[in-house]
Image (spheres, grey):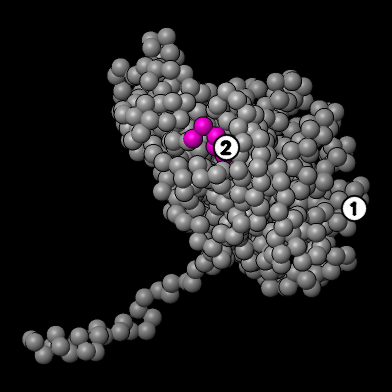
C-alpha cells in the first residue's frame, strides 16, 4: 500500500484520457490594463477603493421589511420604526425577486440598525432605490429621492457614536409622468436594489470628482478635473487640494470653499498618455485629496470620440458599433444581480465579439466599472421611453428628463466607456415634439461637451428631429416581427432596407447607428424547419441579416442587437404580446443560456472584427463580410 502511495506521489495521478473533459474556452477578459494598484473597495460597490481616509460602514445585508399596500405606514408612524416587519430581505435586492412579493407594486418599508464606531457627519450613499425613496434616521427625515438607476446621498451632520435606526420607504409605482413612465416594456423592480453604505466625513469633504481628458493632438492630454466640495461649516473654508495620477502628484492648489460647498475645476497635463479603446482599455487611477482629512479615488481613460465624415470616429479611427441592448435583469435577482453575475454578463458579451452595450437606463456602477476596465463602450440613455408629444409638453416631464441626465452625467461623464448620451427612446410622432426636444438638447449639451448627443428614434419615417442629432439612432429590423403574418421574405427585407436608406439620403453627413436591430422573440429551445415566428431559426435569421446590413453599409456606423437576454416585462404586458410575461428577444435566455442567434451574431461580429478597422476606408464601400 505504502509503495502505491509513494508511486502516486512521485508520478502524479494518471492524466485523464484525451477528450475526456470538454475543453474550457480561454477567457475573453484580459487582466486590467493599469500601472497603478488603486486597491479593493471594502463596500464591494465598485472595482476599486473610493477613499483611504473615510470610515465606511457597509449597510448591505438583511433588512426588516413590510409591504404597505394601503399606503398607511407614514400616518401610522413607520418612520420611527416598522412595528411588525413581515420578513427580512437581502439588500441590495428587490422584493419582486421574492416569491411572496413577486408582483407587488406599491409602497414598502425597510429598516435596519447599525452602529456608529465614532461620532461624526454621516453620509449615507444609496446606489439606487427604485423608484422613490424617503429616508429617516432615528425617526428624522434625512433625505428623499425620485428615480431609480442612479445614486443619491443623504448627509446628516453630527451623528453620535453608538446604535442608530435607519428606515426607508420605497415605492415602485410609476405614473404617466414618472421617469420611466407606467407600462414600459421592462419590470419596475422595487427595492434598495444597488449597494448602500455609510461614511463618516469631515466638515469639508469631496462630494464627487471626475476627469475629462482631452487629446490635444500632440503628445499630451489635457485633464479637465471637475469636482464638487461640501463645506458644513458656517463660514468659507480654505481647501488645500492635491491631485494625483497613478500615485504621482500633478496638481496642487488652494481653493476657497463657500459655506454649503461649491464646484471646483482645474486642469492638469498628462504626457504621452496611453489610449483607451475596446481592444486596449488602459485605465489611469486618480486621487483627489483635501488636505489630510479627505480623499476620493476615481479612474479615467484617455480617448477621443468624434463625429466626422458621416462616421463615428474613436481615437482617429472609424468605429463600427457592434453591440447588445441589455436590461439589468435576471430571474433570480431581478434588477439587483450580484457582482459575479454582472461579471459573467461582461464575459458573455465580450465572447460574442461585441464592443458596445446600450441600456434604456443607467447600469449599476459596478457594471460600468467593468465596461471601463474590459473595454465595452456604453450608449447611455435617460429612461424617457415612448413619451407621447402630449406627455412631453408637460414642463414637469421635461425637467425630470434634464434632472435625470444631470445625475447621469455627474456619475458617468468621467468614464471612457460612455460613447453617447441619449435623451430617450422611441417618442411616438417625435417630429411633433421637435421644439420641446430642441430646447432640451440645448440645455443638455451644456452638461457635457465631449460626447455626441442623440435621441433614439423608432424608424426611418422621422424627418425633422433627425436634423438636430449628432448621431442618428434608429431602431430597425430587416424583417418585421410584430406583423402576425410575417415571414422571412426577401422582398420585405429589401423594402425595409430601402426605407432605412432614406435617412442617409436626407442626412448624408450624419452617422447612423441601428440602436436596436433584429428584434424578434424566440422561445428558447423551440426549433423548426420553417423559420416561423417564435422559433430560434426565425430570430437568428432576422438578427443575422440585420447585423450584416448594419456592418456592410458604409453609411451605417453599426448597431446593437435587440436584445442581450430575455427580460421580465411590466405586469400590464403579461400575456399581451409578451409570452409568459417576458420579453423573449434575448440572444441568450433569461438564465444566459445561448440561443441560436447568439452563435450567428458571434459569427457576424467576429468575421467583421477580423478585418482590421484601419483597413476600412472612411468613405467608399468596405466590401462584403461574407
Ligand atoms: C422597442 C423598444 C424596446 C422593446 C422593443 C420590443 O424597440 O425600444 O424597449 O420594447 O421595442 O421588444 O418590442
Asked whether residue 605 is in view, the answer is no
Assess whether mark 2 and mark 1 are in contact (beta carbons under 8 angstroms). no
The mark lying in front, picked from 1 and 2, is 2
Dominant secondary structure (helix, strand or loop) of the stretch shown in magenta: strand
Residue indicated by mark 2: 207
The vertical placement of 167 against 486, above or below, is: above
Q: Within 10 angstroms of label 1, few (less than 14), some, or many (20 or more) residues?
A: some
Q: Looking at the rendering, which quadrant does residue 384 occupy?
A: top right
Residue drawn at x 34%, y 29% is: 161
The vertical placement of 192 against 523, above or below, is: above
Q: Toward the viewer: 230 or 32?
A: 230
Q: Is residue 239 magenta?
A: no
Image quarter where the C terminus lies is bottom right
Residues drawn in magenta? 202-207
Q: Looking at mark 2, is its residue's CB closer than 8 Å to ligand 1?
A: no
Residue 524, percent across and down?
50, 52
Residue drawn at x 84%, y 69% is: 617
Q: What is the tally of numbered marks visible in this picture?
A: 2
Residue drawn at x 51%, y 45% is: 292
Q: Is residue 204 magenta?
A: yes
Q: CA distance from mark 1 to mark 2?
A: 41 Å
Residue drawn at x 33%, y 84% is: 17
Residue 334, percent across and down?
46, 40
Residue 509's label in the rendered image is 1
Tell me the element at label 1: loop
Q: Within 10 angstroms of label 2, few (less than 14), some, or many (20 or more) residues?
A: some
Amino acid at each position: 500500500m505504502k509503495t502505491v502511495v509513494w508511486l502516486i506521489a512521485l508520478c502524479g495521478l494518471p492524466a485523464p484520457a484525451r477528450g475526456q473533459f470538454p475543453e474550457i474556452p480561454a477567457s475573453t477578459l484580459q487582466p486590467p490594463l493599469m500601472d497603478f494598484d488603486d486597491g479593493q473597495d471594502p463596500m464591494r460597490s465598485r472595482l476599486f477603493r473610493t477613499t483611504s481616509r473615510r470610515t465606511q460602514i457597509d449597510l448591505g445585508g438583511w433588512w426588516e421589511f413590510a409591504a404597505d399596500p394601503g399606503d398607511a405606514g407614514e400616518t401610522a408612524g413607520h418612520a420611527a420604526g416598522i412595528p411588525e416587519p413581515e420578513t427580512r430581505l437581502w439588500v441590495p435586492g428587490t422584493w419582486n425577486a421574492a416569491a411572496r412579493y413577486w408582483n407587488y407594486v406599491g409602497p414598502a418599508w425597510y429598516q435596519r440598525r447599525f452602529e456608529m464606531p465614532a461620532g461624526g457627519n454621516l453620509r449615507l450613499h444609496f446606489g439606487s432605490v427604485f423608484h422613490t425613496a424617503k429616508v429617516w434616521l432615528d425617526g428624522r427625515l434625512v433625505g428623499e429621492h425620485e428615480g431609480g438607476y442612479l445614486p443619491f446621498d443623504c448627509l446628516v451632520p453630527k451623528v453620535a457614536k453608538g446604535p442608530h435606526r435607519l428606515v426607508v420607504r420605497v415605492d415602485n409605482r410609476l405614473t404617466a409622468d414618472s421617469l420611466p413612465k407606467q407600462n414600459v416594456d421592462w419590470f419596475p423592480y422595487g427595492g434598495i436594489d444597488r449597494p448602500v453604505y455609510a461614511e463618516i466625513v469631515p466638515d469639508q469633504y469631496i462630494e464627487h470628482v471626475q476627469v475629462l481628458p482631452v487629446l490635444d493632438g500632440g503628445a499630451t492630454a489635457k485633464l479637465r478635473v471637475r469636482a464638487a466640495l461640501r463645506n458644513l461649516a458656517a463660514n468659507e473654508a480654505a481647501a488645500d487640494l492635491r491631485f494625483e495620477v497613478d500615485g504621482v502628484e500633478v496638481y496642487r492648489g488652494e481653493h476657497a470653499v463657500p459655506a454649503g460647498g461649491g464646484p471646483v475645476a482645474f486642469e492638469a497635463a498628462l504626457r504621452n498618455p496611453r489610449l483607451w479603446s475596446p481592444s486596449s482599455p488602459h485605465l489611469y487611477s486618480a486621487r483627489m485629496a483635501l488636505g489630510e482629512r479627505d480623499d476620493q479615488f476615481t479612474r479615467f481613460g484617455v480617448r477621443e470620440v468624434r463625429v466626422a465624415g458621416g462616421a463615428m470616429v474613436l481615437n482617429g479611427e472609424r468605429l463600427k458599433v457592434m453591440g447588445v441592448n441589455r436590461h439589468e435583469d435576471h430571474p433570480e435577482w431581478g434588477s439587483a444581480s450580484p457582482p459575479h453575475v454582472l461579471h459573467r454578463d461582461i464575459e458573455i458579451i465580450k465572447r460574442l465579439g461585441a464592443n458596445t452595450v446600450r441600456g434604456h437606463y443607467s447600469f449599476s456602477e459596478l457594471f460600468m466599472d467593468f465596461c471601463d476596465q474590459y473595454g465595452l463602450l456604453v450608449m447611455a440613455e435617460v429612461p424617457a421611453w415612448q413619451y407621447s408629444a402630449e406627455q412631453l409638453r408637460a414642463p414637469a416631464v421635461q425637467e425630470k428628463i434634464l434632472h435625470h441626465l444631470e445625475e447621469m452625467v455627474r456619475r458617468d461623464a468621467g468614464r471612457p466607456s460612455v460613447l453617447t448620451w441619449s435623451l430617450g427612446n422611441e417618442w411616438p410622432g417625435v417630429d411633433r415634439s421637435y421644439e420641446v426636444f430642441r430646447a432640451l438638447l440645448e440645455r443638455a449639451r451644456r452638461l457635457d461637451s465631449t460626447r455626441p448627443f442623440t435621441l433614439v428614434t423608432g424608424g426611418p419615417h422621422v424627418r425633422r428631429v433627425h436634423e438636430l442629432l449628432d448621431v442618428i439612432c434608429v431602431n430597425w429590423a430587416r424583417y418585421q416581427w410584430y406583423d402576425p403574418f410575417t415571414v422571412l421574405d426577401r422582398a420585405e427585407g429589401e423594402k425595409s432596407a430601402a426605407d432605412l436608406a432614406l435617412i442617409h439620403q436626407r442626412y448624408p453627413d450624419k452617422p447612423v447607428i441601428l440602436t436596436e436591430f433584429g428584434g424578434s422573440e424566440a422561445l428558447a429551445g423551440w426549433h423548426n424547419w420553417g423559420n416561423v415566428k417564435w422559433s430560434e431559426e426565425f430570430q437568428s435569421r432576422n438578427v443575422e441579416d440585420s447585423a450584416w446590413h448594419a456592418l456592410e453599409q458604409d453609411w451605417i456606423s453599426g448597431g446593437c442587437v435587440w436584445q442581450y437576454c430575455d427580460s421580465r416585462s411590466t405586469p400590464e404586458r403579461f400575456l399581451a404580446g409578451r409570452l409568459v410575461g417576458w420579453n423573449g428577444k434575448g440572444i441568450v435566455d433569461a438564465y444566459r443560456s445561448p440561443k441560436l442567434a447568439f452563435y450567428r451574431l458571434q459569427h457576424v461580429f467576429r468575421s467583421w472584427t477580423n478585418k482590421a478597422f484601419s483597413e476600412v476606408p472612411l468613405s467608399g464601400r468596405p466590401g462584403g463580410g461574407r
